[in-house]
Amino acid sequence: MSVEAEVTVTVVDDVRIVRVVGEFDAEGAEALAH
């Protein structure tokens, strides 16, 4: 998991937010990403 998280953050900061917030609410992640 730590490896995936690191890669996500390295690829795109937005993706990290989507992944983290996606755990509690997928829709909320999209709202923050946009």
Image: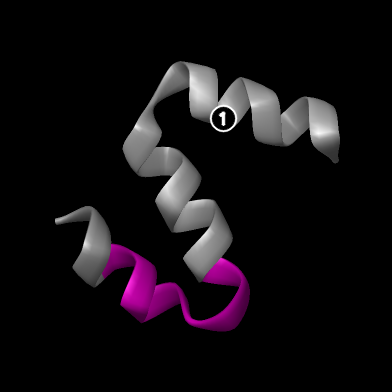
**Residue density around tag 1, few if under 14, some if 14–19, many if 20 or more, within 10 Å:** some
Q: In this view, which residue lies farthest toward the left?
A: 34
At a point 37% along the width and 33% down the height, the residue shown is 13
- The x and y percentages for residue 8 are 56, 30
Number of marks in the rendered image: 1
At a point 56% along the width and 59% down the height, the residue shown is 20
Q: Which residues are magenta?
A: 22-30
Q: Is residue 33 left or right of residue 11?
A: left
What kind of element bears circle 1? Answer: helix
Q: Is residue 9 above or below residue 14?
A: above
Q: Is residue 32 left or right of residue 17?
A: left
The answer to which image quadrant residue 6 occupies is: top right
At a point 38% along the width and 26% down the height, the residue shown is 12
Q: Is residue 11 above or below residue 22?
A: above
Colour scheme employed for the rendering of this structure: one colour
Inspect the magenta stretch and tell me whether residue 29 lies in it.
Answer: yes
Residue placed under numbered mark 1 in the picture: 8
Is most of the magenta stretch helix, strand or loop? Answer: helix
On the rendered image, what quadrant is the C terminus found in? bottom left
The answer to which image quadrant residue 4 occupies is: top right
Inspect the magenta stretch and tell me whether residue 27 lies in it.
Answer: yes
Q: Is residue 4 left or right of residue 12?
A: right
At a point 24% along the width and 64% down the height, the residue shown is 32
On the rendered image, what quadrant is the N terminus found in? top right
- The x and y percentages for residue 2 are 83, 35
Q: Give the amino acid at mark 1.
A: Thr
Q: Is residue 33 above or below residue 3?
A: below
